[in-house]
Amino acid sequence: MNFNRIFWLTNIGLAIYFGVWVGLQTWEQYLNKSVVLSIRRDHYSWNTSMPSLTICPNYERISRNLFDIYAKNNKIKDDEKEDFYEFLNSMANASYATFKNIENFSSTDSVLNRLLITPNVYIRIISKLTEDKSQEDKFDTKIKNINDLEPIAVVRTLTDFGICYTTNNFLSNNLSTSFLLSNIYPDMEKYHYDVDKIMYVKHGNIFDGHLTYNFNGFNRLITIYLHSPYEVMNVAKPMGTTPDTMEFEVFSTELLSEPYLQENTWVIQRKCRFHNESNLEHFPVYTKNLCLSECRAKLMLEKCGCIPHFIPNRVQNPKRVCNWRELKECATLYEDMFIEFRRRLPNGTIEFIDCECMTNCEDTEIVVERIQKLSGASDIVGSLGGLVITKKYPQVRYYRQQLFTFTDLLISIGGAAGLFIGFSVKGLLQIIHHFTWRLLTFRSEP
């Protein structure tokens, strides 16, 4: 009798153990191995998106005309006016790599105090005194992107290099200066040039031949960033600062997702995020570079006790914004940490900081095949900018797709439970019936 009990208890225990073990293995597969990258080669039917350009002016971002009006309305003294203009212009050009270049004048603090200008409003004043040249009426001085007489949207965006201009991008409206500071989308009607529809992202296929666009309207000195149309610029990866127009010949490969992948999977399964799955505090959409931008701000908050003025701070619990002295004196000490995410430990070794930023579920891998400075082009065109050319098209495209679905999970766990312990839905209902309905009816009998 004892032997039979031990035998069956052992068998049942082993059956439950292996059933649970197989179920956990199946659950781990569902969480971590259910989404894969597949390669597709039907390239004749694709439209490939061209890369995006973000260009930041490096010279006199603050408008002289707007500043003169501001100085007159606020009664800034003549002997303070030029110094205060230089200060504001240096703040407009400030980034993690240029905080050390912020101008310091003896009258700066007195003017800021007299005008009640706190660090919280630095970026609003800079935005107010910076002309949006993408919406100018005069075509010759307008910052524009024209291809075959068709306009491609240009939006003034707020970046880690202050106020810049972005074109050929899916996210530009959500990252525009007006939206991040005031929750107002830019007025796109001013871009139309008598054309009914404006193009946000230019794309083409192998039958279209060479694709190109010309992003111009800048003067003197510019910093250019080339990036995916699904992304924003990374302040640590400029293509260069130049007084000339730059031409980029590029080759792009897109990584996309199958339909309904977002609805049918969790972020932990995909190991990536879609734009509308933002877990960021300061930005309404998610991209990996925006995550890195917020990581830089958090590191600066940790080291200096404040965040840069160009980080959108329209959040539920606003962070303290650095004043100009903190930017110049504190942030400069940690330049490598903020830009490259590396810090030197006491023993002298270099440690890289992991910001735990997931990749984008949809993105473009860009290979720059040729870069050329078009010296003298500004004399012909009348302005600086960036020229992007696509001559070759990809023959493969990567897709994220789910191979192991929730239905597969249920079948696998149900099969394992049935194999090891004879479990079934019918058996579950019988157990529920036995311990509920039968128990209730038994108690109600006289």
Image (spheres, helix red, strand yellow):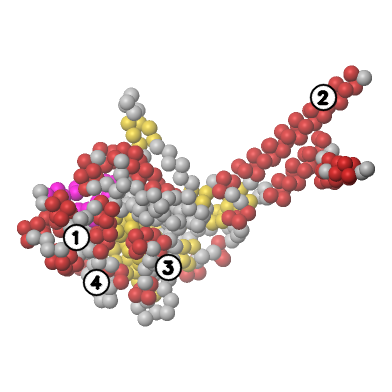
x, y percent for residue 268: 57, 45
Viewport quadrant of the N terminus:
top right
Which mark, residue 60? 1
Q: Is residue 103 magenta?
A: yes
Task: Tell me how far mark 1 sits from mark 3, CA to CA.
Answer: 28 Å
Range covered by the magenta-colored residues? 86-105
Disc with the residue nearer the chain's start (2 vs 4):
2
Of helix, strand and loop, which one carries label 2?
Answer: helix
Q: Nearer the viewer, residue 311 or 115?
A: 115
Q: Which residue, given by chain and number where applicable, does mark 4 sit on? A: 141
Q: Is residue 29 magenta?
A: no
Task: Tell me how far mark 2 sits from mark 1, CA to CA.
Answer: 82 Å
Pointer 3 with pointer 2, Cβ within 8 A: no
Of helix, strand and loop, which one carries label 3?
Answer: loop
Residue 207 visible here: yes
Q: Nearer the viewer, residue 325 or 338?
A: 325
444 to the left or right of 76: right
Disc 3 crowd rating (10 Å Cα; few below 14, some 14-19, many 20+) is some
Disc 1 crowd rating (10 Å Cα; few below 14, some 14-19, many 20+) is some
Q: Which residue, given by chain and number where applicable, does mark 3 sit on? A: 200
Q: Nearer the viewer, mark 4 or mark 1?
A: 1
Residue type marked 2: Thr
Disc with the residue nearer the chain's start (4 vs 1):
1
